[in-house]
Amino acid sequence: MTALRDATPALRTPDPKPVKKSRFRRDRSLLLMVIPAVLLLIVFNYVPMFGTATAFQRYSIYAGFWHSPWSGLETFRQLFSDPYFWSALGNTLELSLIQLIFYFPIPIALALLLHSIMSTKVRTIVQSVVYLPHFFSWVLAVTIFQQMLGGAGALNQFLRQHDLGTFDVMTNPDTFALLVTSQVIWKEAGWGIIVFLAALAAIDTQLYEAAAADGAGRWRRLWHITLPGIRGVIVLMLVLRLGNVLTVGFEQMLIQRGAVGRDAAEVLDTYAYYYGVVNANFSLGAAASLFKGVLSLLFLLAANKIAHLLGEDGLYRR
Amino acid sequence: MKLDRRQLLALTGLGAASTVLAACGDAKTSSGPGTTTQDQLTKLLPAYAPNELVKADIPSVNGANGFFSNPAFLKYPANPVTTVNGVPGKGGSYTTMTPLWGAIPSASGNAYYAEVNKVLGATLKLQPADGSNYDKVLPTLFAGDKLSDWVQIPSWNMGNLGFADAVNKFADLGPYLSGDAIKAYPNLAAIPTSAWQCCIWNGKLFGLPVYYSGATIAGTLFHRKDILAKEGINPDDIKTPADLAELGKQLTSAAAGRWAFDDVFDSLGQIYKFPVDPNRWVIDEGGKIIHRYETPGILEALEWYQTQAKAGHVHPDALADKKEDAKQRFWSGKVVVTGDGPGAWKGDDAKSGKAANPSYDRQAFKLLSTDGKPQIWMNPSAGMYSFLNAKLSADQIKECLSIANYLAAPYGSKEYLTVNFGVEGTDYTMVDGNPVLTERGSKEVATTYQFLITPISPTTVIAGQTQVVKDYAAWEADMVKYAAKPAFYGMNVTEPAQYASINQPMVDLVKDIRYGRKPISAYQEGLKTWKAQGGDQLRAFYEDIRSKYGTGQ
């Protein structure tokens, strides 16, 4: 990465005027290719942002945006005085933290393991097997867990038939955080390794050869070549993860909320869904979502700042 | 429109609110409580002219409080009668939206759709939508003003729509149907008054009733009679909740993969006397209006259920809130007692159950009670209604009503066969005197046209299962003896929108307690919050309704 940065000093020249025009000419086709994606963003991400106006209205679906009466910060007062909202925020942060600690390192470790496998055949097989769960919907994933680990699932029926004690992790609110984290690991860890594998592939193999020639063992090569080589990507992924810290899987929570109860499974997204959509209090849902959006942005910027202080690129180069 | 609304507001004593309305211009934030006075009702209700074509094999039985069981038929008449002369449509084209619980049929190459549209002489472009998520779709359609020409809305999806406001988007059918005007549509005139009464909001007739009957219930307790028989249990001996609890012990054999109960909580409402949706309020012995959550019965029911859950008598998947697989659990005998709607007890259910186990026999318990005096609160006669878009012209409305007249043709008619079964030989064949869907038919014929309007529900043979009809008719004839009207029966009261979300914490709390995650003692705390957040104001709202409109009982 450092080598890449030094090799393209032109990008960093603080002399925009003459460069701007020629850069535009040079990047013309690239910019053209980006247009559809930008349009998509505008239509589906930016235009709907006007909907956040409902957070400041007493929104009625019959009056619409234009005729619903304004209510100032009333909805936010209602939101912040609701103990269920704070408990949803608490759950969100708790689940996020647990997933950060237990989930985040797993794709990296998996990628390192896979990278060290020499046989491409074994590698392809393992890769396919760990990718697969990503393509299951959450409904299916939770059903599989229910059928394996549920109170009437395969494991408990086996224990029952052998007169052993049973345990139902699917309906236990106390262990719910661990349950959802293991579900995320099972479903998404395989998919998560793709980025890291790409980063590993970009490391110059000559470095390994040189280090091996100098007598560096497996661990030293990992520590001094592999990890520094993918550090930038790890930090980038960490920054992105922190920006998403308030998103812990809407569907996964929604499907299992009834099984463990609100106290354990209500997160900001399900709160906005139940109080906003299900009970048709759209203003409250919009306020909860806006709060989440603003907080997420702050998390993202803070994480990016820290990345810069550590000398990494983060989301963009300074 | 505006004048009418103001008159109505004055009438409902909400004169103060009308000034707010005037100030907001088009901001229709409230159209009042939705309900209608008795005098207005009398003027609005269409005349009633029954047209029973065929004599029922098992006639309707009159029960308590004017409720009656459905007539039951064991064989379709060999020579169906024609009730509609000529072609009802004038070549118009209309979009429709109806909920559907099940696979949505393909519209292209659908012989059933083609045939019904042909006989109607109009094109109904059917857009069935997933019934389970219908309540999430409707608000967006209202907000975006993208409603179809003909829309069906179930009563249980109306609560959060603020329906007194929503109906302004639909055509007032009063001028076409009130009083003797309805006689232009004989099949509509055969719809009983109790069903039309559910179709009135804000003093106007808006809806067409769908699947109504003389005794509509939310659901009841079912059991596997074949399994009970094997265990030597006579279902008629089960009369009290204590008897039912006893079954928990007798029928559960977890190691063998069998549990006594599925999620039967809502069915306990009938036994412990707390109302279930769409009924929410009752009037206690002292005359006080109390919500379902304030009834002593709901606490007893929670205690009963929690005891069973903790004792391991409830299927673990039911305790994991997996409602969607409840029917499979019952069919496969993994649970013996379950709660379900009356619609679950039909021929197609027997067919599915027997596929899993040939001795499958679903029966309902006779009504249970705590004190030997069973009672069951009725739902409004019709649970679903369809509406015509206010944007349609008078001629278009008349065409749609003629089409409705065709779709509402009674059992025993030629039209009923076409609307419900499609083309003979392609979609259905007659087996032992009853229409049975072919393989193609079961893919093409879904409840689509029927969700726009129906004749009064008959109990009929489905999938050749004659015994089910006999059993259901006998059970229903017994059930109607205990039928009662809950408070505000069939009055279409629209609760103010700001109270919509106060119930969510209670819904969650009730689940926490019944599944055993929280102690019973946690209930009172939650109830206190509910009252403070608006429960008490809501009661005052209903006190006001009672003083102005009565209780509908």
Image (cartoon, rainbow, N blue to C red):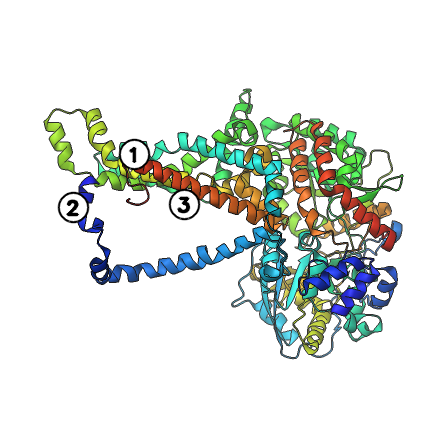
Quadrant position of residue B260: top right
Instruction: Look at the numbered disc 1 and give the secondary structure of its residue.
Output: loop
What is the chain identity of the residue bearing mark 1?
A
The front one of B249 and A131 is A131
- Residue at 70% from the left image edge and 34% from the top image edge: B526
As drawn, which residue projects farthest toward the left? A213
What is the chain identity of the residue bearing mark 3?
A
Percent coordinates x, y for residue B328 in the rendering: 60, 42
Q: Residue at label 1?
A: A310
The front one of B514 and B54 is B514
Marker count (numbered):
3
Q: Residue at label 3?
A: A135
Q: Nearer the viewer, mark 3 or mark 2?
A: 2
Q: Residue at label 2?
A: A7
Quadrant position of residue B131: bottom right
Circle 2 residues within 10 Å: few <14, some 14–19, many ≥20: few
Disc sitting over residue B327 in the figure: none
